[in-house]
Image (spheres, grey):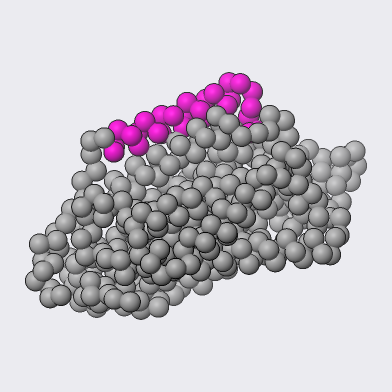
Amino acid sequence: MGNHNHTHNFTEQFTFSGKLKTWTLLAIVVGILTIGFGFITGQQERTFANLLLMAYYTTCVCATGLFFIALQYVAQAGWATGLIRIPQAMSRVLPIASLVLIVVCASGLMTHNLYHHWNAEGLTDPASPSYDKLIAGKAAFLNVPFFLTRLVLFLGAYSFFAWLFAKYAQREELEGGLVFYDKSFKWSAIFLIIFGFTTPIWAFDTIMSLEAHWFSTMFGWYNFAAMWVSGLCVITLIVILMKKAGYLSWVNENHLHDLGKFIFAFSIFWTYIWFSQFLLIYYANIPEETVYFYKRWEPEYLPWFWLNILINFVAPILILMARDSKRQMNRLMFVCIMLLCGHWLDYYMMIMPGTVESHRGFGIIEIGIAIGFVGFFTFLTLSQLTKRSMVATNHPFLEESINHQI
């Protein structure tokens, strides 16, 4: 397959217009109306919990785009070069998604709708009737100023790297050569170290501290696994939908196979961490640890608890195990959509039992806010995709990616 076959695609430009744009904007409106509905009907806690869920989920998916790019540079992998524009577009949405997450967390703290387990009056005051010795012991770490500072620092750092990699990619496209590839390689290594050490703390803060009495040292990696699988599914889904729309003609089933293997492998990894956390707590049977799962075994959550495992573990194993199924667009697309719903449910199970006391359940608020954020993410990501050619023209590994075969 010579290079000349592909030259006509090398200026390929994505246009984001018409029905697709209308649908994404419509989804955003649905989300905004749902948030309004939640507040008007007095379901503040539940609305805030869903806002946190989707803001965190969206930010995680955008951060995965960045992580994916850095990983390709550090591993000096060539296969993904032909589709690198997609994680690049996702990573450029990260600053906006981060801002939304920070606003949700800050307003949740101010209104005491989120994090009230450690942010209520008198918890750290020995003279107060609601004094909590355990929370008082964690007060040096769990206090509003330090909490928000960490959140802003971590997400700010990730956003800076997103901006940096985008700048280098742009310069590489204009000037060619290896200068910017080498810079991206160096900064990717630095980013991965920072990301590796801060992601668990980010998960501890945003999600685990919702139930501040309970903690698990595995929680950070459990969140990382969920985030990585979700992000891979989004990348794969966009690649498949782009191919169906007639773009990315140089991406073939070999690329899809690699993405499918990643999704398959890390679904197993997610299950491994989930099960390790669950089994240790179940087996040790220490009250302060079991309280977490006890809440999730209440009748209203138990079906979701098992469905979570079924979707995120059993389904990818049964559907993606065979080589051929990773190379079939429709089957891969089905698995991606299913896993994205599955990890939504995973986050739902992490957040809801510890935040929503009254008005529990599953309904309009959950669905509407999810639709809104999906529209918001899709609109921003596809808008970013229109800004560059769909192929990384001067990337040193482009030829390798085009002729990729496994």
Assign the N terminus to one quadrant of the image: bottom left
* Position of residue 283 measured from the top left corner of the image (x, y, whole percent): 82, 64
* Position of residue 244 measured from the top left corner of the image (x, y, whole percent): 26, 51
Q: Is residue 193 left or right of residue 93?
A: right
Residue 14 sits above or below residue 193 on the image = above
Q: Is residue 43 magenta?
A: yes
Query: Depth check: 263 or 329 in front?
Result: 329
* Position of residue 213 measured from the top left corner of the image (x, y, whole percent): 79, 52
Residue 255 figure quarter: bottom left
Q: Is residue 8 left or right of residue 74?
A: left
**What residue appears at the point 78 percent right and 38 percent down from the top-left corner?**
121
* Position of residue 253 measured from the top left corner of the image (x, y, whole percent): 30, 66
Residue 76 figure quarter: bottom left
Residue 145 sits above or below residue 274 on the image = above
- Magenta range is 20-46
Query: Depth check: 131 or 195 in front?
Result: 195
